[in-house]
Amino acid sequence: MSETYEKETVLIVEDDEIQRIILIEFFKTLGYEVDYAADGQQGLEKALSNKPDIILLDVYLPIKDGLEILEEIRDNPEMSYTIIVMMSADSSEDTTILGLMKQADEFVYKPVRTTELALKLRQLVDRKNNRLALDEMNKKLRAEKEILSHYFSDDVVAKIVENKDENKMSGENLVASILFFDIRNFTSISENLKPNLVADLLNLIFTDVMDLILSHDGSVNKLIGDAILATFGCPFNSDKDALNAVKCALSIASTIEFFNKVKPSYLDNEIKIGIGITTGEVFAGNIGSYRRMEYTVIGDIVNTASRLQNLTKKAGVNILIDGNTRNAVKDITRCRKVIVKGIRGKQQEIEIYSLDGLVDDSQSTKDIDDLTYF
C-alpha cells in the first residue's frame, strides 16, 4: 500500500504466529514502530509500560484473555486515548458486543483484511485527534473560567462563557451599580507593620470582602492598593444590581465589625472602612492594546463612587450612596440625607445618603429625619 500515516507506536498481541508476522510487516510498511507479544500477560505488561498509541488485541490468548487486558487498560487513566482494536476468528455477535461494551474502539475478524484495517485505523486516528483537540479546548476553557472566577460570580462566568454576543466583553454602555471599598488610614497602619504582615492583613480582609462581592452577584473589577472597585451589573445587568450592591456593602460592614473583635495580635488599632455606591450608565468592556487587555468600567459614576467613599470619614459613616442608588432601594433601606457643600471634581450637585441598614416590618421606609452636615 502506498498510503502512509503519521508515525505512531503499535503493539500487536497475537498468539497465532502467521497472523502476527503478517500484521507486523503490514504496519512496518506504513511507517509504524511495531512491538508484539505472543500471550496475554506479556501483552498487558508491554501495554502498561510502553503505552503504545495503537493496540491490536486478540480476544482469545494464552495466560490472560484479551477482554481482561482490555478492561485493565481502560482502567488506566494514562491510556484513555489509546486506540484498541479487538481481533477474533469468533464472528458471533455476543463476542463483538462484549468487546465494544468494554470500550474497544473497533472489532475486526480474522483472518484480518489489511485494507479494511487500514481504513478503520485512519478513521480511529482522526477520531482520536479530534478528541485530543476538543479536550485541549475544554482544558483551556476550564483555565479561562478559573481565571474569570476570581473576578466574577459563578453565574456571571457561566453567562460570559455561554454568551455569543462578543460586544458583552468588547464593550458597551449599560446601567450598573459601582461599589468602591477602601480601608481608612491604611498607610499609617502599614508604617507600624513589617511588609509580610501588611500583605497578610490585606489578604485576610480582601478574602472576606471579595467573597461577599461575588456572593452578591457582583464582580471584582480592580484591586487598587488597599481598595477594591466592584461592579454590579457588568457585563450582565439586572433590576437587582443596586439592591445587591447595598446588601453587599452592609454585609461587608458587619464582617469588618466582627473582624475587629478577632483581629490578629499584631494589629493594634481597629480597621475602619469607607464604601461609596453609585448607580448609572457606564462603559463596560475591554480596554488596552494587543499587548495587554483589561476588562474595566468607565464613567462619571465610577469616579463619584470613589468620591463618596472619601466622604464617609468626614460624614462619620461607613457607607454613602448616591440618589440613583437610594431611589432604586428606598423601599427596603433606612437612609439619612447628607448635606455637603460640594464634591471635589463634581460641578453638578448630587444627592447623597448615608446607608444605615435594611428595614424590617417594624420600621418605616421613610428616610431618618436627622440630616448629617459637613
Image (cartoon, rainbow, N blue to C red):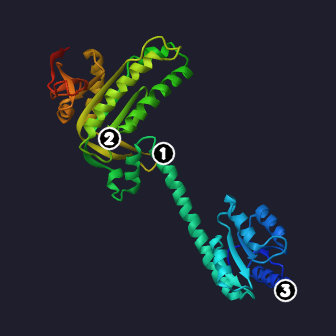
Left or right: residue 164 compared with residue 106: left
Q: Position of residue 283 (x, y in %)?
A: 28, 44
Q: Is residue 3 visible?
A: no
Left or right: residue 330 compared with residue 30: left
Which amino acid type corresponds to the residue marked 3 in the rendered image? Ile
Return the disc, 1 or 3, that comes first in the chain's sequence: 3
Residue visible at 63% across and 72% down in the picture: 101
Image quadrant assignment for residue 23: bottom right
Label 1 belongs to which residue? 147
Residue 297, numbered circle: 2
In this view, which residue lies farthest toward the top?
A: 268
Q: Is residue 153 visible?
A: yes
* SS at mark 3 in the image: helix
Image quadrant assignment for residue 368: top left
Residue 18, numbered circle: 3
Residue visible at 25% across and 47% down in the picture: 173
Residue visible at 36% across and 23% down in the picture: 254
Dot in front, 1 or 2:
1
In front here: 149 or 57? 57
* SS at mark 1 in the image: helix
Residue visible at 52% across and 50% down in the picture: 143
* SS at mark 2 in the image: strand
